[in-house]
Amino acid sequence: MKPPYNITPQILQLVASIFEKIGEVNAAHLTKLPPELRKKNRIKTIQSSLEIEGNTLTIEQITALLENKRVVGPQKDILEVKNAITVYDKLHSFNAYSLKSFCDAHKILMTGLIADAGKLRTKNVGIVTGSVVKHIAPSGNMVKSLMNDLFTYLKKDSDLLLIKSCVFHYELEFIHPFLDGNGRMGRLWQTVILKDSYPMFEYLPIETIIKEKQKEYYNALSKSDKLGNSTPFVAYMLGVINEALEVLLQSQNIALTALDRMEIMRDFIDTTSFTRQDYLRRFKEISPATASRDLKAAVDEGLLKKSGDKRMSRYVFGVGRDRSE
């Protein structure tokens, strides 16, 4: 059964704004960020998502862990970060439409933190703040069937993927399929859902915006619970995505290096050969002389193979540098 929600004028306006910004991101070659910015955004994502759940480690400490350096801090917090680093490194191995893959991700994220990492709960649970019961989740014996229905909706419903990712995020928090780790899984899986269609979402600082608007995050969940549909949460998450894209667009003043341009070109062109003119059409902001220097340096490093001469020169990507660097 399709989860209940309404497409409101506010949601339509946000969707239009998001797609406009996605177009700007594509035009500015920001679908694949420079390596240093990718690293910074990934660290911010991990730190923000875990801070929401009470983790105390700083960006500097998480950076040190990412670089395999020793960090002093609560062992639980350190393990949470190490698990999160592992799961985000494996982002491309997860199938957004597979419940098994979803559980596999939870197992990585929560190993050593709870006994049943990766296993759907069978017990009844509620969310309590102080002495107030904030949410009573569906019965444990309903969890598997509810999650199967949710993945069926994600895979087969005809609504925009952007909206479905927000609905999925809310419904996941409502079902509360695991004994712990549901919040971080909701934020992680929305990224998994969106990244294949919109590559910029892999490094989009959505969690950072959520952390800054944490009160509104929980208010949107609460409003949706009271209404019995995810409309308020969908509007909230679309607003977060819209703001995160704006932050990404503001980063475009960061100058791309020759290697950054080559990595972008390789993603764009793949195995097809291309000319200097093709390269200039992709990077309108550089001069012909800069393009020539880029191409020569890439040939010298073994990133490109060249055939022909002068105006007839064509280039194709060879093995060269590891793309993950």
Image (spheres, rainbow, N blue to C red):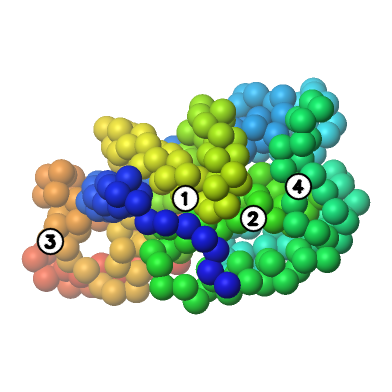
Label disc, if present, on residue 277 of the rendered structure = 3
Q: Position of residue 35 (x, y in %)?
A: 45, 43
| Percent position of residue 140, x then y | 83, 60
Q: Secondary structure at mark 3?
A: helix
Q: Earlier in the sequence, mark 3 or mark 4?
A: 4
Q: Position of residue 219 (x, y in %)?
A: 56, 34
Tell me which residue sits at (63%, 71%) in the image: 149
In terms of sequence position, does the residue under pointer 1 or pointer 2 come before the other?
A: 2
The amino acid beneath tag 4 is: Ile
Residue 3 numbered tag: none
Task: State the separation of the CA atoms marked 3 and 1.
Answer: 48 Å
The answer to whether 236 appears left or right of 288 in the picture is: right
Q: Nearer the viewer, mark 3 or mark 2?
A: 2
Mark 1 touching mark 2, by CB under 8 A? Answer: no
Q: Which of the two discs, 3 and 1, sits closer to the camera? A: 1
Instruction: Quote the CA–CA distance across marks 3 and 4.
Output: 61 Å
Tag 3 near tag 1, CB within 8 Å: no
N-terminal-most mark, 3 or 2? 2
Q: Disc 2 marks which amino acid?
A: Leu
Which label sits in the foreground, 1 or 2?
Answer: 1
Q: Nearer the viewer, residue 170 or 305?
A: 170
Which residue is identified by label 2?
172
Q: CA distance from mark 1 to mark 2?
A: 14 Å
Query: Nearest the camera: 277 or 186?
Result: 186
